[in-house]
């Protein structure tokens, strides 16, 4: 009697989609604030067929001439490790940090949420907003605009509750991240 044993895959490209679960990763990049840096980072993702779920960029230090890019993407652990290694090779990238693997990592997002409502739906929208600490920043007789910040999962849950009440429009900033403690990136 012979055992039917499959050989181990030679690379991550040989894995079937069911062999590894996809996960989300948030990468914080410290980069030189120069023309073309963002293009090179985004081009790396596009050239390899990786999707960017969230992207935020801003100058963080004028004197040091640096910016911070926060990228949220999905993939298997092997693909995410490959993305991190390739980001470290991009010219003008000073540091790459996988925030999702860091127990000291903090992720937050800001959203503006427009909700239509009158009567009982209006009262319920205000009650839910209060529970989620969403602040009304504009109100009319027919609608609200709420400002909410927190972990992306908190915002997703808030949106799930607002949809049946009359969610009209949504604007999200994308994920921002930072590490707890006294050390900087």
Image (tube, helix red, strand yellow):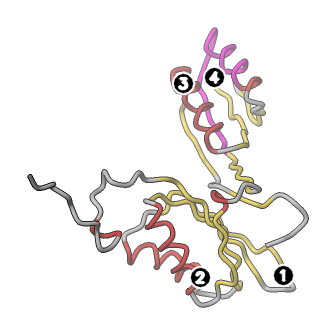
Rendering quarter of residue 33: bottom right
* Left or right of 44, for residue 182: right
Q: Quick one: label 1, few (<14), some, or many (20+) residues within 10 Å?
A: few
Horizontally, residue 146 falls left or right of residue 27, namely right
Neighbour class for label 3 at 10 Å: few (<14), some, many (≥20)?
Answer: some
Q: Residue at x 47, y 74 (%)?
A: 82
Q: Foreground: 93 or 148?
A: 93
Q: Would you say the residues marked 4 and 3 are in contact, meaning their CB atoms lie under 8 Å apart?
A: no
Residue bearing mark 3: 166
Q: Which residue is mark 2?
A: 88
Between marks 2 and 4, how big is the CA–CA gap? 50 Å
- Dot placed on the residue nearer the N-terminal end, 4 or 1: 1
- Magenta range: 111-128
Compared with 116, 47 (above or below) is below
Residue occupied by mark 1: 62
Q: Mark 1 or 3 closer to N-term?
A: 1
Residue drawn at x 64%, y 26% is 143
Which circle marks residue 142 in the picture? 4
Residue 9 pos. (x, y %): 28, 68
Q: Nearer the viewer, mark 2 or mark 4?
A: 2
Counting residues from the start of the chain, the first of labels 2 and 1 encountered is 1
Q: Quadrant of residue 154?
A: top right
- Extreme right residue here? 182
SS at circle 1: loop
Q: Position of residue 5 (x, y in %)?
A: 20, 58
The secondary element bearing badge 3 is classed as helix
Q: CA distance from mark 1 to mark 3?
A: 43 Å
């Amino acid at each position: 009697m012979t055992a039917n044993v499959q050989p181990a895959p030679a690379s991550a490209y040989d894995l079937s989609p069911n062999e590894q679960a996809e996960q989300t990763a948030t990468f914080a990049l410290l980069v030189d604030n120069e023309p073309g840096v963002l293009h090179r980072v985004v081009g790396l993702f596009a050239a390899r067929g990786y999707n960017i779920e969230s992207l935020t960029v801003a100058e963080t230090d004028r004197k040091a001439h640096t910016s911070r890019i926060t990228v949220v993407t999905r993939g298997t652990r092997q693909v995410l490790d490959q993305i991190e290694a390739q980001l470290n090779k991009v010219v003008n990238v000073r540091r790459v940090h996988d925030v999702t693997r860091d127990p000291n990592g903090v992720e937050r997002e800001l959203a503006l949420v427009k909700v239509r409502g009158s009567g009982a739906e209006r009262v319920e929208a205000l009650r839910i907003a209060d529970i989620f600490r969403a602040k009304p920043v504009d109100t009319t007789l027919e609608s609200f605009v709420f400002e909410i910040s927190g972990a992306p999962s908190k915002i997703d849950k808030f949106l799930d509750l607002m949809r049946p009440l009359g969610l009209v429009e949504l604007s999200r900033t994308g994920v921002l991240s930072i590490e707890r403690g006294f050390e900087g990136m």
